């Protein structure tokens, strides 16, 4: 594994950083204070991101994306992650990789419009009664001739308000396994406006202001079998091919935010004076900086190694879980320490630190909680011993 960046990778990092600083940072305070990101602003920044070649950079070249390898894509994600989440997600979007699993008809209808910036996707798995335990979902689909009829409720569904369609994961049967009955899951494309499909406002969230979540209700919602993504009963197989990459994407965006917070902390420690000297001269402060830098590097190395292995085809669930776990917990640690180093000023919204601190909270919950990541890692340790 080569630890240095290629010229191309450096250029992508610099271009993305410049875009984030020039086009996203100026809008952060307004989004944080109002909790709202207008569609006009989304469209304005989106147009610039498309012109700069930064939009949908996670996608392969043959479908109109940038065709980056995983490591390079994650370097790009790290830069995006520095900014407010709503701004970077909706304005410089990455359509879900899962859309690549669609057949050509589905790609025409869903994937390409997302890549062109004409619409957005959203993914509906979580339910009020089924979070970490997704197989426990109650929402179901029943076959009826050439159609399937969907019923149930999903919640916490990110940016479903602006999405043109959702990919809804529904229980479509049950099979017996040695561990007891197991639900079979199928993924369906459901267009906004389909009869029986309702999107309503979700909850107010302490993290990621402006980044909305919604409740999705399916009430005898009828979709044709052509709307199935992948195969019947194989929804999780499709999702699993995408979830690992998403965990690395979460890790990378956390690294970007952690680096931004550390940068502020270093600058402040070097200029703020108390008791007649720079506070960075106090070991109580300088040792914090040393620990923050070390933890960040450890998280970054884990993430980069997992990305590199992803491209070699050797990545394991543990690699991706370790990267996600370490990066999200490191962000929480660094955000908290950066505020401590700033004293009271760290809590004021003139600086992005209180925002980064709030935003860090959700990262240990979505895309698999920290406990679930630890479960995945420990399972891989214990299974060979039959435990
Ligand atoms: C802002 C936001 C946006 C989201 N966007 C989406 C989206 O777009 N689409 C979507 O489908 N979902 C989305 N989610 C849902 C997210 O993935 C879930 O919140 C997450 O999977 C955890 O589920 P839960 O909140 O129901 O918690 P629960 O699963 O109920 O967990 C509660 C607690 O129990 C612990 N726990 C559960 N099982 C175990 C276990 N086996 N071992 C140890 N501890 C365990 C958890 O770690 C946690 O601490 C979003 C969530 C948020 C907050």
Image (cartoon, grey):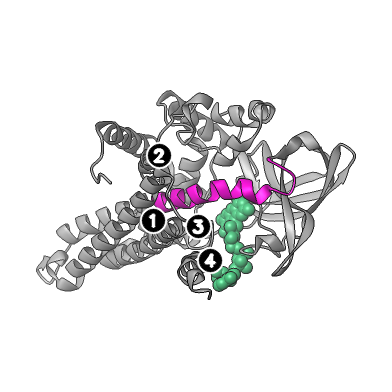
Whether disc 3's CB lies below 8 Å from ligand 1 is answered yes
**First in residue order: circle 1 vs circle 3:** 3
Mark 2 touches mark 4? (CB < 8 Å)? no
Picture residue at 23% right of the left edge, 68% below the top: 288
Mark 1 touches mark 3? (CB < 8 Å)? no
Q: Which residues are magenta?
A: 230-253
Foreground residue among 122 and 233: 233
Callout 1: SS: loop
User: How dense is the environment of label 3, judged by Cα within 10 Å: few (below 14), some, or many (20 and up)?
Assistant: some
Q: Which mark is residue 207?
A: 3
**First in residue order: circle 4 vs circle 1:** 1
**First in residue order: circle 2 vs circle 3:** 2
Picture residue at 74% right of the left edge, 55% below the top: 184
Whether disc 4's CB lies below 8 Å from ligand 1 is answered yes
Residue at the spot of label 4: 372
- Measured as percent of width and height from the top left, residue 158 is found at 60, 49
Q: Tell me the distance, in whole angstroms, between the alpha carbons under discs 2 and 3.
A: 24 Å
Overall secondary structure of the magenta section: helix
Q: Tell me the distance, in whole angstroms, between the alpha carbons under discs 4 and 1.
A: 33 Å
User: How dense is the environment of label 4, judged by Cα within 10 Å: few (below 14), some, or many (20 and up)?
Assistant: some
**First in residue order: circle 1 vs circle 2:** 2
Q: Tell me the distance, in whole angstroms, between the alpha carbons under discs 2 and 4.
A: 25 Å
Along the horizontal axis of the image, is 225 left or right of 45? right
Q: Tell me the distance, in whole angstroms, between the alpha carbons under discs 1 and 2.
A: 30 Å
Q: Per the image, is 86 magenta? A: no
User: Taking the image as drawn, is residue 96 in sight?
Assistant: no
- Measured as percent of width and height from the top left, residue 3 is found at 24, 46
């Amino acid at each position: 594994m080569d630890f240095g960046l290629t010229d191309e990778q450096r250029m992508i990092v610099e271009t993305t950083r410049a875009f984030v600083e020039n086009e996203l940072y100026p809008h952060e305070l307004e989004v944080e204070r109002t909790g709202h990101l207008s569609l006009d602003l989304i469209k304005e920044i989106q147009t610039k991101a498309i012109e700069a070649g930064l939009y949908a950079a996670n996608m392969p070249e043959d479908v109109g994306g940038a065709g980056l390898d995983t490591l390079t894509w994650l370097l790009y994600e790290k830069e995006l992650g520095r900014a407010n989440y709503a701004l970077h997600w909706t304005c410089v979007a990455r359509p879900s990789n899962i859309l690549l699993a669609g057949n050509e008809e589905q790609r025409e209808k869903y994937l390409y419009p997302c890549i062109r910036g004409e619409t957005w996707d959203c993914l509906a798995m979580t339910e009020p009664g089924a979070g970490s335990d997704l197989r426990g979902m109650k929402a179901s689909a029943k076959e009826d001739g050439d159609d399937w009829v969907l019923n149930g409720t999903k919640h916490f569904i990110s940016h479903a308000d602006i999405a043109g369609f959702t990919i809804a994961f529904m229980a479509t049967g049950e099979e017996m396994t040695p561990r007891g009955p197991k639900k079979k899951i199928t993924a369906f494309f459901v267009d906004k406006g389909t009869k029986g499909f309702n999107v309503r406002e979700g909850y107010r969230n302490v993290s990621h202001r402006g980044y909305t979540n919604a409740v999705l209700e399916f009430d005898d919602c009828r979709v044709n079998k052509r709307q199935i993504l992948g195969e019947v009963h194989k929804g999780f197989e499709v999702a699993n091919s995408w979830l690992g990459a998403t965990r690395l994407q979460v890790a990378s965006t956390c690294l970007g935010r952690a680096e931004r917070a550390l940068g502020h902390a270093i600058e402040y420690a070097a200029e703020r004076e108390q008791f007649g000297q720079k506070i960075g001269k106090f070991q109580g402060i300088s040792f914090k900086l040393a620990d923050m830098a070390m933890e960040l590097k450890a998280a970054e190395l884990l993430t980069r190694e997992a990305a590199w292995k992803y491209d070699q085809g050797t990545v394991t669930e543990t690699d991706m879980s370790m990267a996600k776990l370490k990066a999200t917990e490191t962000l929480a640690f660094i955000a908290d320490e950066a505020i401590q180093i700033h004293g009271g000023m760290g809590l004021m919204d003139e600086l992005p630190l209180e925002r980064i601190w709030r935003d860090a909270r959700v990262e240990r919950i979505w895309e698999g909680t920290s406990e679930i990541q630890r479960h995945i890692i420990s399972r891989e340790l214990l299974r060979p011993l039959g435990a």
